[in-house]
Amino acid sequence: MRLTGEEAALPVNILTGFLGSGKTTLLRRILAAEAYGDTAVLINEFGEVGLDHVLVGEITPDVVLLNSGCLCCRLRGELRDALADLLARRVAGELPAFKRVIIETTGLAQPSLLVSTVLADPQIRHHFSVGSIAATVDCVHAAAARQLPEWLAQVAAADTLVLTKGDLADAIQVNEMHGMLNSLNPTARRRDAATLDVAELFAREQLAYAGRWMPVSSRSAPSGLVNNKESTHDPAVGTVHVQADAPIDWEAFGVWLSMLLHAHGNNILRVKGMLYLTESHGPVVIQGVQHTIYPPEHLPEWHGAPRTDLVFITYRLDAQRIKRSFETFVLKKREGRESGVS
């Protein structure tokens, strides 16, 4: 069971969002869109998304074909088993060939667990890759939901934030929501659900990480470690910005990050950025959610001055401890090497 050529890695995209945030309404639009005619969509229950108006017929007891050409499948049991079953049916010719997968999560899901499933299982990782993550954000109730770790994890993990119920929110609610998003996930695209072209929602799948994960940084800030003090409206959530102008050691960085995630992975909602390494001519892009780090992406060259530039979004962690540990395990390792001390 092996794919070849351009089909060697089918992107798995994730649609998430908290309870009542409009995720099901958005999913209906995706399922009806011709742009996703070569897509397999894994959802929890067909009845929750009202497929009658687009349903063509049943292919197997668990798979239906929509007018758009999209395959719609019940997600039962483990995601790993569902993906393996989809792939086996595709290879056997039991299902039409699909070019991507979209997973609709439950309202209380943490996307990091899905990302981990795709990256951790050897068989799944061979045939599938992590695509894009979109999260619906309720403009009316975001202020109340911000205290919930599931909501924080969903928003922090997203490439695209789809803002829903904007017509029902007042100016104060909208401004407060944007303030939270500016601190929690400043690099994500934001789209209004009312005007969103769903065809673009997952069009960025498998683009170069440089475009998807470049952190927002202040180039005028001094070299070293910078803590972003923008308010998150929740003192438990913090944004730590780490910078270094001189190249750092890959092995030292890897050991440090592994220890950090082992000890505090549940409280690191997101890490993303670019590394300036002694071992690489171009930038190396790092990104991850909670305990899971995606495979590093090596880019051919720098655009602008080389610099290590990382953003951590944390929950109930002391930013100063992250700073001190980075300085101790990574920056001092570099300084020791330059002075001839091993």
Image (cartoon, grey):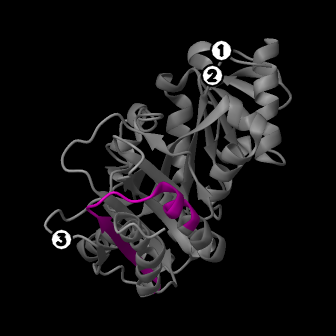
Name the residue at 60% across, 36% down.
Answer: 129
Residue 133 visible in the current orientation: yes
Write the start and end of the magenta stretch as one range: 236-255
- Picture residue at 44% right of the left edge, 58% below the top: 249
Residue 279: percent from left, percent from top: 42, 46
The Cα–Cα distance between marks 2 and 1, rounded to whole angstroms, is 5 Å
Side of 54 where 298 appears, left or right? left
- Residue 244 colored in magenta in the image: yes
Q: Is residue 254 above or below residue 75?
A: below
**Is 242 one of the magenta-colored residues?**
yes
Foreground residue among 220 and 70: 220
- Assign a secondary structure to mark 2: loop
Tell whether 324 sits left or right of 307.
Answer: right
Which residue is pictured at 40% across the width and 36% down the height?
208
Q: Earlier in the sequence, mark 3 or mark 2?
A: 2
Q: Residues within 10 Å of mark 1 (few under 14, many from 20)?
A: few
Q: Position of residue 214 (x, y in %)?
A: 33, 51
In the rendered structure, which amino acid carries the disc numbered 1? Thr
The residue under label 3 is: 221
- Number of numbered tags placed on the structure image: 3
Work out whether residue 39 or residue 341 is closer to the camera in this orientation and state it. 341
Q: Which mark is residue 4?
A: 1
Residue 8 disc label:
2
Residue type, mark 3 in image: Ala
Q: In terms of secondary structure, where does tag 1 sit?
A: loop
Q: Quadrant of residue 170?
A: bottom left
Q: Position of residue 282 (x, y in %)?
A: 34, 41
